[in-house]
Amino acid sequence: MPRYARPSTVAEALALLADGRWRCLAGGTDVYPALGDRPLADDVLDLNDLEALCGIAESDGDIVIGARTTWSALLAADLPPAFDALRQAAREVGSVQIQNAGTVAGNLCNASPAADGVPPLLALDAAVELASQAGTRRLPLADFLRGNRETALAGDELMVAVRVPKAAARGRSAFLKLGARRYLVIAIAMVAARLTLDGAGRIAEAAIAVGACSPVARRLARLETALAGRTAGADSDAAVAAHPFDELAPIDDVRGTADYRRAAVREIVARAVRLAGAPRDAGKAA
């Protein structure tokens, strides 16, 4: 018979993880739908009593999002404008009921190419904090996500936090998601853009991340460089139009063809850059 455990402390959870393989359960919003009509046969480690992993706090150098923080809690948090893309993505994570239960770490550990939370966190230079009985390690999110449903999480590890460097929590950001309908949809393509502007209103720094167009979401480093020194608008549109987007590897599936995704992502990158470069009220991001 499968085992079930519900630890009340992180130390207890790590001891259990060191003692065998478990299916970690937080919100459960990804686990149960994936089962279909099959019973859950794995040993289940229920993390819902780990209150220490909930909430958002600041350390000396980071803004720290606890692994069990829900999307609804993130939406309610007082965060700087650089987090607007993440807040906008939070509104796209299923229904309100899903946002109330689903967790930030669950979205990342599920490692779907279309995970809504990934592009905004990539644009924030986020890292994940992974704990085991042997200690704690930190990985850039880009290194943690290795492929479709594949991560660097070891069997005895638990994600305990997502860390955003305060140096990356500057500027303004925007998130756009293209789907077959407005809500409750898996993305065809999605983009997060974060910009910092200089005193003349030109782009001093850009961070652009695209999801649902590769096995993992990707930052577009060459486009980020090309945007530096431009203004958000026709000038940034020209840089986007000239970019080949060859970092991406879109596929044909039931939601759209690879060619459609390539064309669509160019358009929504241009729009996201414009939104991130606009005053916060104009983007209606809060």
Image (cartoon, grey):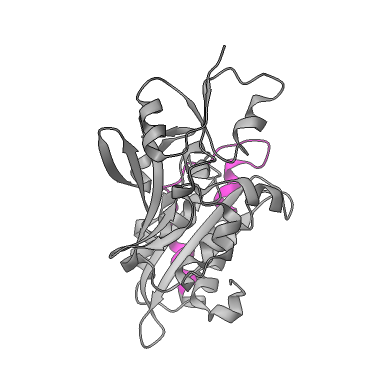
Pick the front one: 50 or 110: 50
Q: Is residue 193 left or right of residue 196?
A: right
Q: Is residue 244 left or right of residue 113?
A: left
Q: Is residue 33 left or right of residue 233?
A: right
Residue farthest toward the right in the current orientation of the protein: 181
User: Which image quarter: residue 4?
Assistant: top right
In the rendered image, residue 56 lying in the magenta stretch gets the answer no
Q: Which residues are magenta?
A: 236-264
Q: Is residue 267 visible?
A: no
Q: How many marks?
A: 0
- Which x, y percent locates residue 157? 36, 33
Residue at x 68%, y 36% (from the top left corner): 254
Residue farthest toward the left in the current orientation of the protein: 134
Pick the front one: 233 or 211: 211
Q: Is residue 226 visible?
A: yes
Pick the front one: 167 or 19: 19
- Which x, y percent locates residue 104? 51, 49
